[in-house]
Image (cartoon, rainbow, N blue to C red):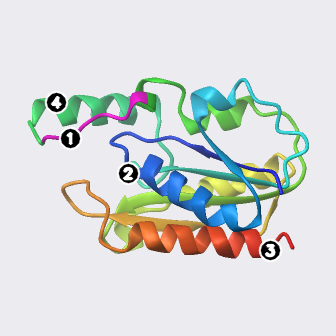
């Protein structure tokens, strides 16, 4: 199996989830993990599975304005947050907009604050919709992984991401 997990991450939470999903996918073969910026240089042809995820900002996928605000917020409020090295690169919205027609199996995930989805939204739903519009077949419902109000992953979310990766791998057998 050949799988790639493409992520966008602001504070490293989505990056950590992407790595855990790839670990779970490893039960069926190796999975690469790349940022949206790195994915611009990739040929997606021949993938058995494309998994795409990013943080939820303002009820959906990030935009340049929300990404900039997140980086500024981490510095101005002295929250002790570390900005992910990929945060200054291309976001998922722009990467997805640049994709040509695709084919194959895909899945979408996001990270969002642990609050009712009605209040936070789900970036994964929009990511999934974009993947389908580009010709990919979703093999699972979009999935959310939760962070606390201070932007740390909730306990158990990495294990849940690994299990989700294993479940995605099982859809390919």
Q: Which residues are the magenta region?
A: 80-85
Badge 2: how crowded within 10 Å, few (<14), some, or many (20+)? Answer: many
Mark 4 element type: helix
Indicate which disc, 3 or 1, sits on the residue closer to the N terminus.
1
How far apart marks 2 and 4 lie (CA) works out to: 17 Å
**Residue 135 shows in this picture:** yes
Nearer the viewer's eye, disc 4 or disc 3?
3
**Residue placed under numbered mark 4 in the picture:** 75
**Residue placed under numbered mark 1 in the picture:** 81
In which image quadrant can residue 26 be found? Answer: bottom right
Indicate which disc, 2 or 3, sits on the residue closer to the N terminus.
2
> Where residue 91 sits in the image (x, y, percent)?
53, 33
**Residue placed under numbered mark 3 in the picture:** 171
**Residue 141 shows in this picture:** no
Q: Nearer the viewer, residue 78 or 129?
A: 78
83 on left or right of 158: left
Point 8% across, 36% down: residue = 78
Mark 3 element type: loop
Indicate which disc, 1 or 2, sits on the residue closer to the N terminus.
2
**Residue placed under numbered mark 2 in the picture:** 13
Image mark count: 4
In the picture, which quadrant includes the C terminus?
bottom right
Magenta-colored segment: predominant secondary structure: loop
Point 21% across, 60% down: residue = 149
In which image quadrant can residue 1 be found? Answer: bottom right
Badge 3: how crowded within 10 Å, few (<14), some, or many (20+)? Answer: few
């Amino acid at each position: 199996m050949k799988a790639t997990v493409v992520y966008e991450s602001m504070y490293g939470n989505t990056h950590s989830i992407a790595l855990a999903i790839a670990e779970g996918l490893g039960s069926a073969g190796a999975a690469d993990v790349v940022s949206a910026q790195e994915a611009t240089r990739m040929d997606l042809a021949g993938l058995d599975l494309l998994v795409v995820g990013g943080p939820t900002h303002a009820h959906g996928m990030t935009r340049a304005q929300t990404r900039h605000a997140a980086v500024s917020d981490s510095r101005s409020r002295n929250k002790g947050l570390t900005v992910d090295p990929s945060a200054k690169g291309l976001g998922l919205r722009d990467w997805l907009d640049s994709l040509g027609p695709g084919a194959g199996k895909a899945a979408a995930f996001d990270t969002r604050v642990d609050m009712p989805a009605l209040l936070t939204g789900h970036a994964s739903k929009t990511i999934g919709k974009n993947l389908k519009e580009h010709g990919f077949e979703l093999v699972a419902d979009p999935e959310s992984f939760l962070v606390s109000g201070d932007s740390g992953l909730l306990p158990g979310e990495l294990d849940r991401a690994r299990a989700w990766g294993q479940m995605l791998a099982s859809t390919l057998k």
